[in-house]
Amino acid sequence: MDHYCVLGNPVEHSKSPLIHARFAELMGQSIAYTKQWVATDGFSDMLAQLQADGVRGCNVTVPFKFEAFQAALHPTERAQLAQAANTLRFDDAGIYADNTDGIGLVNDIEHNAGVRLAGRDILLVGAGGAAAGVLGPLLASGPRRLVVVNRSADKATALVARHRAHPWVQDLLQKTELLAQQIHAVEGDFDVMINATASSLAGVALPIASHVLKPGALAYDMMYGPAAEPFAQWATRHGAVARDGLGMLVEQAAAAFALWRGVHPPSGQVLREMRAALLPAA
Ligand code: NDP
C-alpha cells in the first residue's frame, strides 16, 4: 500500500488525512495517509527519513512550505512563483514539488461557486505565504485587473514585482493589469475579493473599506469554520456573497491527489460531505 503524509508543526488540526482517505475510498484506491509532526529544525531530516522508508509523497503545511520548495529538484512554475510548496512527490529522479493552493482556490471559485474569473476585477488582500501561493494561478485565470494589497504595503509591492519579473508571467500580463496598492487607498471596486490574511484567524476585522466590493461581489475568506463568520457577516452586510476557504482546502488536496495518483477525485462531493459535517447539529 502506498503511503503519504502531511508534515507540519502544529499538525494535529489537519483535515488532510480525512480528505485523502475519502478520496481514496471514492476512487477505489488503497492508500495510507498519516499526520507527521516535525520539529522546527527537523524538516530536511524528516524528508530523508520518509524517502528511506519508501513514502511516496507528502503535503506540507506551516511553517515548512518554504523549506519544502528549497528541497525540491523539480519545482513546478507555480511553486517557483510562490517560492513555496505544499505538495511533494518522491521520485527516483528526486523530489518533485508543486503548490496546489492556488489551483485549489481557483477551482473552488470557478467550479464550486460557479464564478468565472476571466475578465473580472480581483482584489487579493494579503502578501504572506497563502497570497504568494495563489497569485500565479489567479493571474493564469485571466482577470482584467488584479490588485494586491497588504497591511505592510512593501510586502505587496515585492510580491507583485517578483511575479512581474518571472518569464512565465510575461504573456499573462498582456491580458491582466497587475498592481500593488495601499490597503487604505484602494482604487475602484472589485467582482472578487480574496482575504488571504490571517485576520480571521486573529479574530480581528480586516482593515479595508467596504467600497471595494461591487454589488453582488464574491468575498472569499481563506479561513473556514466559525472564525470565518465575522468576515462573512461584514461582506454580506455590504451586498457581497461570502464564501469560506473549506472548498480551497478540499480542492488543493484534490490537486495533490491527482499529482500522486494520476486521477482527479470527486472533490465536489467531498466538499459537500465536509460542509454537512461542519454544520451545527440541529
Ligand atoms: P502568513 O503568516 O504567511 O501571512 C499572514 C498575512 O496576514 C500577511 O499578509 C499579514 O500582513 C496578514 N495579517 C495578519 N494579521 C493581520 C491583521 N490583523 N490585519 C490585516 N492583515 C493581517 O500566513 P499565511 O499567508 O500562510 O496564511 C494566511 C491565512 O490563510 C491563514 O488564516 C491560513 O489559515 C489561511 N490559509 C488557508 C488555506 C486553505 O486551504 N483554505 C491554505 C493556506 C492558508 P503583514 O504582512 O502586514 O503582517
Image (cartoon, grey):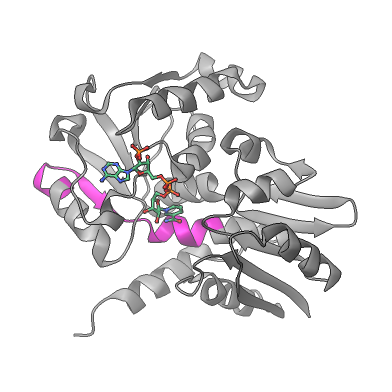
User: Does residue 135 appear left or right of residue 7 in this picture?
Assistant: left
Q: Is residue 176 above or below residue 141?
A: above
Residue at the outermost bottom position: 282
Is residue 204 shown above or below 270? above
At a point 70% along the width and 77% down the height, the residue shown is 29
Q: Quadrant of the N terminus?
A: bottom right
Which residue is located at x 59 percent, y 23 percent? 169
Q: Is residue 135 visible?
A: yes
Which contiguous range is marked in magenta?
235-252
Quadrant holding the C terminus: bottom left
Q: Position of residue 77 (x, y in %)?
A: 67, 35
Q: Is residue 259 visible?
A: no
The answer to whether 245 is drawn above or below residue 39 in the figure is above
Image position, residue 88 (x, y; %): 70, 56
Q: Position of residue 204 (x, y in %)?
A: 20, 51
Asked if residue 246 is among those painted magenta in the image, a careful observer would answer yes
Q: For residue 155, what is the image quadrant? A: top left
Which corner quadrant of the image does residue 13 belong to? bottom left
Q: Quadrant of residue 225?
A: bottom left
